[in-house]
Image (cartoon, grey):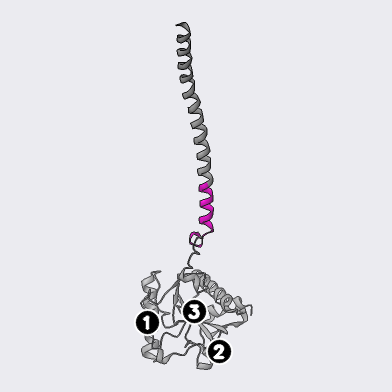
Amino acid sequence: MLAARITQLLGVSLLLILPSGCAGTKSSLRSDLERQDVRNAERLSAKRQQSPRALPRAPQKPAQAATGLSQKVYRRSEWKARSHNAKKLDVVGGTWEKITVHHSDEVGTLVFNGSFSESAQAVRSIQRHHLDGNGWGDIGYHYLIDARGRIFEGREIRWQGAHAGDSRKNRRNLGVCLLGDFNHGVPTAESRVALRGLLDDLREVHRLPRSKVYLHSDLSNTECPGRHLSAWVRSYRGS
């Protein structure tokens, strides 16, 4: 009887011990499985990173950067340009060889209050004069700059300009115009900064030395771009 009782007690003790041992085994097994899951996840992540679909897409260049210009240029649509007349325009047909600086003079009497709308109106006025008064295919300049340093897109650069005189003078010649009359006024600091930045960008994109930046008066019998702006351009090109 005593022997049977001892055997029963030993059996109970074994039962009490076994769950503890199983729990330890399950814990160890769970750790092994978790480590395996981590390794599998790492391998899967590495495989996905090697997949072409998982590679990050190259960011698209903003439209402005695609032109090679570092500064903001207000597009024709932004200043509400009229459509050009392609029948009266000539394709550049080669690389740009020089840049000519002008002043508008036509809007020199306007008092600029710094608003975009006023400058856009001035650019539209110049375009209207060139289209309707001169009978050209579009505004003659490729870029225009107002007193606050805003740069406006004029004639698209795929077209030869109409700003330096005859077709020979305009050939492969980028036209840049500052709004104002600089025989009587001095270009603002903002417009000078914008002009310098634009000239630097255009020269870099088209690989032009400073000596290829001209005054309108260098090419034609005119006072354009006025004595004050002319002095600045001569200083810029080192002449």
Residue 46 in the image: state x and y as whole percent: 54, 53
Could you say where residue 73 lies in the image, as x and y percent from the top left?
Answer: 45, 72
Label annotation for residue 207 = none
Q: Are marks 2 and 3 in contact (CB under 8 Å)?
A: no
Magenta stretch, main secondary structure class: helix
Q: In which quarter of the image is residue 129?
A: bottom left
Compute the Cα span from label 2 to label 3.
18 Å
Residue 70, position as x, y percentages in the image: 52, 69
Identify the amino acid type marked 3.
Phe
Q: Residue 182 carries which label?
A: 3
Give the class, few, some or many, for how many residues have Cα within 10 Å of label 2's Cα (few <14, many ≥20): few
- Which residue is denoted by mark 1 in the rendering? 125
In this rendering, position of residue 220 left or right of residue 131? right
Label 2 vs label 3, nearer the camera: 2
Q: Quadrant of the image for the N terminus?
A: top left
Q: For the residue labelled by badge 1, is the local secondary structure a helix, a strand or a loop? A: helix
Q: How far apart are marks 1 and 2 (CA)?
A: 25 Å
Q: What residue type is labelled 2?
A: Leu
Start and end of the magenta stretch? 40-54
Report the number of discs. 3
What amino acid does circle 1 point to?
A: Ser
Could you say which is closer to the camera, residue 219 or residue 57? 57
Can residue 136 be spotted in the picture? no
47 within the magenta span: yes
Q: Does the magenta stretch include residue 150?
A: no
Q: In this view, does 147 lie above or below 12?
A: below
Q: Is residue 37 left or right of residue 119?
A: right
- In this rendering, the answer to whether 146 lies above or below 166 is above
Q: Name the residue under label 2.
A: 219
Q: Mark 3 packing: few (<14 Cα in 10 Å), some, or many (20+)?
A: many
